[in-house]
Amino acid sequence: MAMATVVALGSGIAAWLTTGGGQARGAPLSDPSVYPPPALHATPSTEVAAPTTTTTTTTTNPGSLSQTEALPPTNSPPFQSDMAALWKGVVSDSPTIALPAFFPEQAYEQVKTITDAQGDYENRLVHDYSLDITAAHDLLGPDPSSAVLVDVEVPESDRHWVPPGVCDNRIGYFEVANSRVVYQQHGVTRSFGIASLISWRGVWYVVHLGAILRSSEIGVVEDPEVGTGYSAPSSTC
């Protein structure tokens, strides 16, 4: 009776070991399901992270700087970038996009001796510029994105220096009238004028896109023409 109990007990232990209740005897040491490998200790890394560097880029508003008597070129990157902004603003009917091409506000405040130069800048000059951007956009018709800028032709032989004391100015600048914005649309070359460009620190900026003086609150396109048009000399303030 005792022998039968021992045999039965032994059989039950063997079954428990071989059915997952314990490790089966005789399993090879290499069997990872039975004898999992010991945890490996990580070797300390000898790599040192490279120090991070931060580059700070600051952009100074040119209008906050002093005027110079540098003669503006028409092939400079700033001028080309500004004219591209002007054209993009015309195509998209966005004065905000075209604003980089416009004379800087702080520069205008330095130039003028008038009362409330800031108000005159915002309420007259920028307001008229916005109206003229929309008028030029309308000139491009129902498919403005088909118009491609070709060039902005500045009649450099007509540029002249406007000295201090003229036109309510305390600071002088170069001025040139009737530049031409030349573009192509549907295979036809067309153009319109920029009434007045003036200089600040050796860069041309638009100060009047359409009419310099106007009798009503409407946008004006300066002399739209088929072809490149003609730049007539003029002296303006």
Image (cartoon, rainbow, N blue to C red):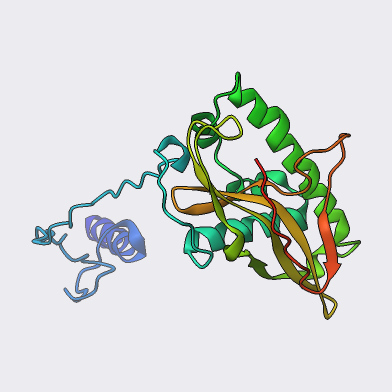
Measured as percent of width and height from the top left, residue 143 is found at 87, 65
Measured as percent of width and height from the top left, residue 55 is found at 29, 50
Measured as percent of width and height from the top left, residue 26 is found at 19, 74
The structure residue drawn at horizontal position 46% and vertical position 56%, both measured from the top left corner, is 71
The structure residue drawn at horizontal position 71% and vertical position 55%, both measured from the top left corner, is 194
Quarter where residue 140 is shown: bottom right
From the viewer's perspective, is residue 137 above or below residue 59? below
Q: What is the quadrant of the C terminus in the image?
A: top right
Q: What is the quadrant of the N terminus in the image?
A: bottom left
Please name whichever residue, 3 or 119, is drawn nearer the observer in this view of the structure. 119
Measured as percent of width and height from the top left, residue 214 is found at 83, 38
Q: Is residue 134 left or right of residue 51?
A: right
Please name whichever residue, 37 or 78, is drawn nearer the observer in this view of the structure. 78
Please name whichever residue, 74 or 135, is drawn nearer the observer in this view of the structure. 74
Q: Is residue 165 left or right of residue 88?
A: left
Name the outermost residue toward the top.
Answer: 115
Quarter where residue 88 is shown: bottom right
The structure residue drawn at horizontal position 55% and vertical position 63%, both measured from the top left corner, is 80
Q: How many marks?
A: 0
From the viewer's perspective, is residue 224 above or below residue 64? below
